[in-house]
Every structure is written in structure tokens, then in C-alpha cells.
Image (cartoon, helix red, strand yellow):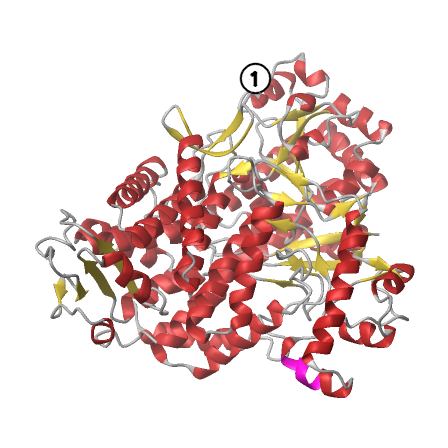
């Protein structure tokens, strides 16, 4: 028995203690039907059949198994090479008896020459189950002997090589319907997958390897046929063909999809219905935009309820700040304790936008606390942010963040114990795990009622909380701190820059803009090697850039242009957007490839807006905004073609494509350019962007400019606000309120 992590393109779900072998018994009789299904032509595969193929591929491989960047050479594969790596995750496996190699393009030349199958094991430093499998299975001498003798073994840090991870994760989804980390894949010598699974116990991994070895000996041709079918399936998933005509974007399309999405809402606990709860901030930013444009109170209320619950949930570290990755329950209580930079960055953006709209001081506090967390816990000496903070300490998940019974007494010392346990939702007879408890403060929405029940004033509670939190900090100071993965990831830092700009606009804190500017300049200086954008770097090692690096950095630069009026940021944003279109162009579609890694067994085109937005949806957004600033139909048309190409995929699944949905919203309802031009443009723009402004782009210039949106609109003695639409501007205003009356969406 073991734990399997489920991955369904957007969400992860746990299936506790499911027998790997029971799946075989349930499906083994269906092999003949499956074999017929798999050879269906790609032209006949629709969305429902694609879903079926996920199961079919898995059944087929089970029937097989249970029936009968530095150069690599032949010598180097005979020893563990990870001691030379800078990746924290790879270094964690440097002492394994397995002859681990890093991912390199030359590895396949060696595997083909030796005619050896490949084990590709993918994870990341803050992954709990990765630690468990490393400690139990990959440290086992017997397992190592099997792997070293029969396979070439590659360890991949998914944060260094996200394209490798996505390619094999897609294969895992098709073959098994599942995914997660660690992701363990067995491939042919050319990298084509024949088996995929997640966490395995030592005995399970031993059994699987031996059966695959036997299969290679007895039925190598069968393995090759399987690999061919898997490859074709993955290629089909990653191909969205060009449309003859642009999509017919309509209000009805959005309304129908919102209504379908409402059926998936968790009315009681907020968010979407799920056994485990992730936050995808782009979902709620889109819903806020939609609700404001259409004045939909039901959507407003759902988002408000969700954001309120999240802010007081187990996701939010109320002592040290920052958000955990997800909760393992549907009520947002029990977190999985790793903290990722991309989560913090997007939460800052989401709560900043929400604060503009609702003016809820608790949202303001969350933005401040999250930024403070990044600056105090995850900041590099160069002022950029590290990638992640581990969930484990001393080999135990959540140990740093949980407390035993004796520690509860110490925390509540000199206060009433029952009041303490009541406030932090502690059930003494129901610990979180073993003898350990999690502290979850009472929701602010219920705090007034709680005070009445406990006969306390707000000042009484504030005094007692001060004692409790001080004692919590004292206890944690003597503990082993969670490990920090100190690599710098360009795309994730770009998300953080965007978050800081959003926070600056919402909270009127100039320090946040100053920080965003300094980060951007540092990132720009460090993230180009030989004129090409990179994805991540640490010390003297770096990885080639992928589409998300170009997309997120381009957006960060555009946001800095909007906040400062400095056209250098616009020019850079346009340049890197153009580079993305040219570098990652796909001949078969109007979308862009995720990477140009030719050693991957398939091309990659990602379109879903999951825990981070699809880089394709961000590029479409970029092209749209650039087109509106420079009045260039070529940019607008390319953006329209990109959005049109995914319209069919979005339909009935809009919750997984929220940035695309926002792109559609910008097209079906009036879109406005607000241009502030003149010597006081910065002051006036700062006031305008303090409002919630959907379906608009707000730009500024203190001086005369050659950008089409600004041409012939500068006057030295006055600052004017121009509200424009379809290349035509209304009468300029000097009064902010009069100007904003021309935009019906602004609150």
C-alpha cells in the first residue's frame, strides 16, 4: 500500500492507500479493447476519447509489466555525478548509491550506444514524498544495484527543467490518469516513455524494475510499440491546430461558462469543490473583473467569501507570514507546508486587486505580511527571491509548524488554557498527527461572536495573543529551520515583480515600486547569457529559458512601464514579447511552444492556467496590450488568433483557463486605454490605479512621446487624462472623477 498523488492538469488530489496491484486486477481483462482504442487515428480523437486514453495507456503498460547541460559519456554514467550540482534537490541525491546523472542532451547518445533503458526521476527540493522515496528507496543498495546494472539513471529538478517535467507529466497523465512528485518514468534509450508512476515503496519499485527488465528481454518490440503509441498520444495533446477563422467571442459564451463553473463552487467553504484545496489566484482576479463588468453580485460574494476564508485558513502562516502550497482537506485547515515563491507572488497580486475593490483592511494586511515574509525569509543578497521553503525539518513534514502537548502548555502559560485552545481551534483529544497539534486562529468573521461567548474585549484578546505569539516564536527559534531552495528562477521572480507593482498601486506604498524596479534591473542583468534569456541560475550554473520566463518577464516590464511612465520598460516588454513569438513559434498552430528542447520526445504547448498562468495566455495578453498602446493591428490579430485557437478547449472548463477567459472578456466588452500625459502624470496615474480598473490599460508619460497613444497629446502647462477606445479618444479631462466617469467599470 502507498500514497499516490493525483494530477489532473490543474489540481492535485490524494488517493490514500490505494493498492497499485488492485488496479491491475480490475483492468487486466480489458486489454483487447484497449489495444484497439489506442490505435485510433489522431483525427478521430476528441476530448472524451483523450480522457479515455489516459486509462487505456495505463492498462496497456500494466498488462505488459504484470504479464510476462555538461556532457555525459560512457564512463561518467558509471558513477553518481550529482555532487557537482548546485541544485539543492540534485545535491540531496548526491550520496545515493545510484549512478545518478543530470539531464543533458548528450545522455541519449550514451543510452542508445549502450542500448539501455532510462530511469528519469523528477522532483524538487521542498517535495515531501521526494524526500521519503530518496531516503527509503534510492538509498537502498539492492535497488541501486538493479538500476546501475540495467538502466541509465537521470535525476531532474523540475524547477530547473520545467519542460522535461511537463513532457513526462503529460505522458503520466495519459498512461495512468495520475501524476505528482516524485515522478518516476522508465523510457526507451531515446527518451520515449514506457512506464510512469509517482511514489513507490522499495518493494514496489524493485518489482516494477525487474518486470520491465524481463519485458525488454522477452518483448522489446512490444515496448517500442507502446512507446510509439504513448508518444503519439502526448503529441496529440500538445497540438492545437490553426483555425480558419477567429473565434466568435460573445457575452453569452462567458455567461454560460460562468454558470457551469458555479456548479463546481464550494458554497460552504469557498473555492471550487475538491478534496484538497489549491489557490489559483488568476481564477479570482478574472472573477473579480467579470463581476465588476457585469455587476454580478453572486460572483462578487463568492470571491469575497473565498478570499476571507483563505486569509484565515490553514494556508496562511499567521506567525511568520506567507502561504503554504495547498491544504490536504476541503475545509482549508490542514496545510501541506511547503512555501513556493510563485504562490506568494500571485497572492500579493490577488489580495492587492481585491483590496482595491473591497477596501477590506484584512486584505491590506495580508499583502503587507506576505511581502514582509518574502523580504525577511526568502530574499537573496542581490535582492531577488529564492524559489521555495521546504515542508520538512528533521525528516518530518510540518514539524517546524506544529506543537506537542507540552509546548501548548508553554505557549498558553499565564493565560487561560481553554481560552487559548478555543481561539486556535485545538481539540486536545484530536491531534493533527501523533502528539502534534496545528494552531488555526478563529476566523475574523466570527471573532466578535467568539469574544462575547468568552466574555473578552478586543483589548483582552490582543493582550493574550501577544503572549501566545511571543511564546510561539520563542519555541520556534530553537528548532531546525526549513531548508531554503536558493536558486533564482526568472519566471517566478517576474511574477513577484508584478505582485509588487500591484501592491504599490493598491496600497500607495512607494517602497514596493522601488523594490520592484531594483529587482527588475538585477534580474535583467543576471538573466541573460550570450544574449539569450535563461530560466534559473545559481552560482555558475544556469538553464536555458522557457516560454514562461519570456512571458512573465515581459508582463513585469509592462507593469513597470504603466507604474513609472518610463518607455524603456515598454520597449523591453515589446522586445522580449517579440522574441518569445519568434523563438517559440509553432508551425502547426497560432500558439507558442513551451521550450525548444529538441531532445524531448514530444513538443510542448501548454495552455491551461493552473497554479501559475499559461505563458501562452500571458503572451496573448501582452500582444493585446502592446497593440493598444502602439495602435498596431498585427499584434492585435495575432493575439486574437491565439485566443481563438483555444476557445473550444476553454468551453465548459473555463475555471482551468482563467487568464484566457480574461482575454475573452477584454474582447466581448468595451476595452479602454487611459492615457495620462503631462508633468503631473505620475501623481494622477497613482490615484487612478488606486481604483479597480477591469478591461482597461492605464499608461502615462511626463513628456512628449512617439508612442501612438501619446502622439500630439502632450502640453507643457497641463496634465490631461485621455480615455480612448478603438484608437479614438474622448474629450480630455483634467479632473480625475470626470475622466473616470467615461469608463463604466471603474468603482
Q: Quadrant of residue 44?
A: bottom left
The span shown in magenta is 445-449
Against 471, residue 396 (above or below) is above
Q: Where does the image place residue 324, in percent across and percent down from the top left?
A: 65, 56
Q: Residue furthest top?
A: 75
Image x and y of residue 255, in percent: 39, 76
* Helix, strand or loop for the magenta stretch, by majority: helix
User: Is 678 on the left-hand or right-hand side of 326?
Assistant: left
Is 69 in front, or is 586? 69
Where does residue 307 sit, x and y in percent of width and height? 55, 70
In this rendered view, identify the residue nearer to me: 341 or 298: 341
Q: Tag 1's secondary structure?
A: loop
Q: Residues within 10 Å of mark 1 (few under 14, many from 20)?
A: few
Viewer-closest of 650 and 71? 71
Note whether residue 35 is visible.
Answer: no
Please report the residue visible at 37 percent of the width from the left and 69 percent of the height from the top.
692
> Is residue 610 one of those drawn in magenta?
no
Q: Is residue 486 visible?
A: yes
The C terminus lies in quadrant: bottom left
Q: Would residue 280 appear left or right of 205 to someone viewing this image? A: left
278 in relation to 77, above or below? below
Q: Which x, y percent locates residue 697? A: 28, 60
The residue at the far left in this view is 712
Count of numbered marks = 1
Where is mark 1, residue-wise? 71
In this picture, residue 60 sits left or right of residue 350: right
Asked if 515 appears above or below 289 in the picture, the reply is above
448 within the magenta span: yes
Amino acid at each position: 500500500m502507498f500514497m499516490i498523488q493525483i494530477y489532473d492538469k490543474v489540481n492535485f488530489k490524494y488517493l490514500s492507500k490505494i493498492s497499485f496491484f488492485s488496479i491491475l486486477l480490475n483492468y487486466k481483462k480489458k486489454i483487447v479493447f484497449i489495444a484497439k482504442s489506442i490505435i485510433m487515428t489522431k483525427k478521430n480523437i476528441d476530448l472524451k476519447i483523450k480522457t479515455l486514453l489516459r486509462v487505456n495507456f495505463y492498462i496497456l503498460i500494466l498488462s505488459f509489466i504484470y504479464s510476462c547541460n555538461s556532457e555525459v559519456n560512457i564512463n561518467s554514467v558509471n558513477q553518481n555525478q550529482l555532487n557537482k550540482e548546485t541544485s539543492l534537490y540534485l545535491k540531496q541525491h548526491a550520496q545515493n548509491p545510484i549512478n545518478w546523472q543530470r539531464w543533458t542532451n548528450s545522455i541519449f547518445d550514451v543510452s542508445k550506444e549502450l542500448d539501455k533503458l532510462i530511469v528519469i526521476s523528477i522532483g524538487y527540493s521542498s517535495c515531501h514524498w521526494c524526500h521519503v522515496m530518496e531516503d527509503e528507496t534510492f538509498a537502498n543498495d539492492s535497488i541501486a544495484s538493479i538500476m546501475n546494472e540495467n538502466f541509465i539513471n537521470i535525476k531532474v529538478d523540475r524547477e530547473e527543467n520545467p519542460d522535461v517535467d511537463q513532457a513526462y507529466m503529460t505522458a503520466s497523465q495519459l498512461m495512468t490518469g495520475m501524476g505528482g512528485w516524485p515522478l518516476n518514468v522508465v523510457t526507451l534509450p531515446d527518451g520515449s516513455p514506457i512506464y510512469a508512476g509517482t511514489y513507490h515503496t522499495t518493494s514496489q519499485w524493485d518489482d516494477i524494475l525487474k518486470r520491465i527488465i524481463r519485458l525488454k528481454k522477452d518483448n522489446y518490440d512490444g515496448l517500442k510499440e507502446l512507446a510509439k503509441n504513448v508518444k503519439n498520444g502526448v503529441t496529440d495533446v500538445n497540438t492545437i491546430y490553426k483555425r480558419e477563422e477567429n473565434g466568435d467571442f460573445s457575452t453569452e459564451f462567458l455567461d454560460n461558462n460562468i454558470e457551469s463553473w458555479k456548479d463546481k463552487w464550494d458554497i460552504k467553504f469557498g473555492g471550487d469543490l475538491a478534496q484538497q484545496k489549491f489557490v489559483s489566484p488568476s481564477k479570482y482576479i478574472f472573477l473579480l473583473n467579470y463581476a465588476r463588468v457585469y455587476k454580478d453580485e453572486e460572483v462578487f460574494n463568492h470571491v469575497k467569501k473565498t478570499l476571507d476564508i483563505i486569509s484565515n485558513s490553514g494556508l496562511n502562516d499567521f506567525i511568520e507570514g506567507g502561504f503554504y502550497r495547498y491544504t490536504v482537506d476541503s475545509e482549508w485547515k490542514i496545510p501541506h507546508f511547503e512555501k513556493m515563491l510563485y504562490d506568494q507572488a500571485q497572492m500579493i497580486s490577488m489580495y492587492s486587486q481585491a483590496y482595491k475593490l473591497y477596501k477590506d483592511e484584512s486584505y491590506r494586511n495580508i499583502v503587507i505580511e506576505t511581502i514582509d515574509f518574502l523580504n525577511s525569509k526568502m530574499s537573496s543578497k542581490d535582492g531577488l527571491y529564492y524559489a521555495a521553503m521546504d515542508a520538512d525539518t528533521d525528516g518530518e513534514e510540518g514539524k517546524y509548524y506544529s506543537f506537542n502537548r507540552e509546548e501548548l502548555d508553554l505557549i498558553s502559560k499565564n493565560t487561560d488554557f481553554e481560552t487559548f485552545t478555543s481561539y486556535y481551534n485545538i481539540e486536545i483529544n484530536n491531534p493533527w498527527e501523533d502528539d502534534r497539534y496545528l494552531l488555526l486562529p478563529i476566523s475574523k468573521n466570527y471573532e466578535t461572536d467568539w469574544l462575547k461567548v468568552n466574555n473578552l474585549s478586543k483589548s483582552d484578546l490582543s493582550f493574550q495573543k501577544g503572549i501566545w505569539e511571543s511564546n510561539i516564536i520563542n519555541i520556534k527559534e530553537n528548532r531546525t529551520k526549513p531548508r531554503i531552495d536558493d536558486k533564482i528562477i526568472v519566471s517566478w521572480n517576474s511574477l513577484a515583480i508584478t505582485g509588487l507593482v500591484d501592491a504599490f498601486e493598491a496600497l500607495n506604498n512607494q517602497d514596493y515600486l522601488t523594490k520592484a524596479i531594483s529587482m527588475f534591473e538585477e534580474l535583467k542583468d543576471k538573466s541573460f547569457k550570450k544574449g539569450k534569456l535563461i530560466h534559473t541560475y545559481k552560482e555558475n550554473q544556469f538553464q536555458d529559458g522557457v516560454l514562461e520566463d519570456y512571458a512573465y518577464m515581459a508582463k513585469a516590464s509592462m507593469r513597470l512601464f504603466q507604474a513609472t511612465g518610463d518607455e524603456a520598460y515598454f520597449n523591453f516588454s515589446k522586445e522580449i514579447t517579440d522574441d518569445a513569438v519568434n523563438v517559440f513559434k509553432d508551425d502547426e498552430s497560432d500558439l507558442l511552444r513551451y521550450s525548444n528542447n529538441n531532445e524531448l520526445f514530444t513538443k510542448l504547448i501548454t495552455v491551461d492556467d493552473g497554479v501559475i498562468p499559461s505563458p501562452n495566455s500571458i503572451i496573448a495578453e501582452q500582444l493585446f496590450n502592446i497593440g493598444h498602446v502602439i495602435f498596431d493591428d498585427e499584434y492585435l490579430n495575432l493575439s486574437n488568433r491565439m485566443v481563438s485557437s483555444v476557445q473550444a478547449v476553454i468551453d465548459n472548463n473555463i475555471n482551468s483557463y482563467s487568464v484566457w477567459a480574461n482575454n475573452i472578456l477584454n474582447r466581448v466588452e468595451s476595452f479602454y486605454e487611459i492615457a495620462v500625459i503631462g508633468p503631473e502624470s505620475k501623481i494622477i496615474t497613482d490615484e487612478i490605479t488606486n481604483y479597480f480598473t477591469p478591461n482597461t490599460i492605464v499608461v502615462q508619460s511626463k513628456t512628449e512621446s512617439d508612442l501612438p497613444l501619446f502622439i500630439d497629446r502632450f502640453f507643457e502647462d497641463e496634465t490631461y487624462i485621455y480615455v480612448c477606445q478603438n484608437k479614438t479618444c474622448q474629450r480630455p479631462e483634467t479632473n480625475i472623477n470626470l475622466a473616470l466617469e467615461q469608463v463604466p467599470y471603474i468603482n
